[in-house]
Image (cartoon, grey):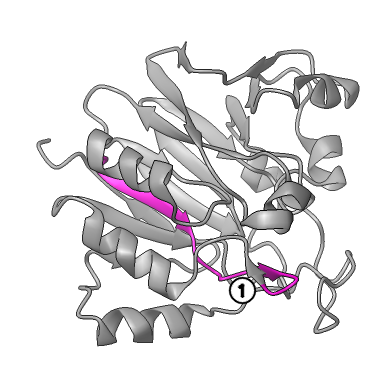
Amino acid sequence: MKLQLLRNATLKLDYAGSTILIDPFFAPKHSRPSFTGRSPNPMTDLPVSTDEILEGVELVLVSHLHADHFDPVAQELVPKHLPLICQPGDEDTIRSFGFTDVTPLTADIRWKNIRLTHRDGNHGTGEVLKLMGNVIGFTIEAENEPSIYWAGDTILYPPVRQTIETTQPDIVVTHSCGAKWDGVLIVMDAEQTVEVCRIAPQKTKIIATHMEALDHATVTRDDLKAYAQAQNIDSHKLIIPFDGETLHLTAPNS
């Protein structure tokens, strides 16, 4: 499989013979308001054109409707006929954007030869969690491909630990920028990302994304790399791709 990090949470996968786009966020640099007063968002441009991103895409996955995961630009540019899988409760809103083939991921779905399974997430704690609303992660599996647990916009909490420990994925994709809202962590930070590395099976690679794109982030790639090194996490275990970087990954037994 090929996994390309585009920016923030946006990924493009070539997986089991199909091309999948996850959480398209196409806003131009500095076109959206600041969260903290530090910088307009997003803080970076996309590394390639939206035409190149959309080329060949056959399936779209949208984890939730926050503007850094499915923004108005993407809502306009993503072809409306493409099958789109979303979290339960978002399907009517997405259909209102003109999308004609929208399916909520309530449990698991088989699309072509790929199995997608709903995974829970917590986008914060306490009152901030209520404010952030519902999110999902998902597992992606297919024969002769590495299994992927895309955790999504979540902190590390018991259901995430349980998913890693019980499903033993080959790859875990984390959102690791340490973003905070009203001082409360709403995605993983360096400490939680390193803890994922520790609880994951030896075979599992952790891919840290959702970094250096938004101004409420508190952890940079260099911060995460330095903390992981200090905690004796091998660079082959924790991969921190740059925007535009493509990773070529295989199942451990292939």
Quarter containing the C terminus: top left
The image shows residue 115, relative to residue 60, as above or below, that is: above
Quarter in which the N terminus is drawn: top left
Give left or right: position of 166 versus 122. left
Tally of numbered tags: 1
Mark 1 Cα-neighbour bin, 10 Å: few <14, some 14–19, many ≥20: many
* Residue 168 in sight from this viewpoint: no
Q: Which residue is mark 1?
A: 212
Tell which residue pokes out farthest to the left in this image.
253
Left or right position of 228 against 7:
left
| Quarter of the view holding residue 205 | bottom left
Q: Position of residue 62 (x, y in %)?
A: 65, 35
Farthest front residue in view: 126
Q: Position of residue 35 (x, y in %)?
A: 82, 71
Question: For the point 59% across and 53% down, which residue is it?
Answer: 9
Residue 187, quarter of the rendered image: bottom right
Foreground: 243 or 148?
148
Pick whichever, 74 or 119, lies toward us: 119
Q: Which residue appears at 81% of the width and 80% of the height?
A: 39
Q: Position of residue 82 (x, y in %)?
A: 68, 21
Q: In the image, which residues are magenta?
A: 169-183
The answer to whether residue 181 is seen in the rendering is yes
Q: Residue at x 38, y 40 (%)?
A: 149
* SS for callout 1: loop
Q: Is residue 11 magenta?
A: no
Q: From what the image shows, is residue 95 above or below residue 23?
A: above
**Is residue 86 or residue 20 the one in the foreground?**
86
Residue 215 locus on image (x, y percent): 73, 75
Magenta region includes residue 180: yes
Tag 1: amino acid: Glu
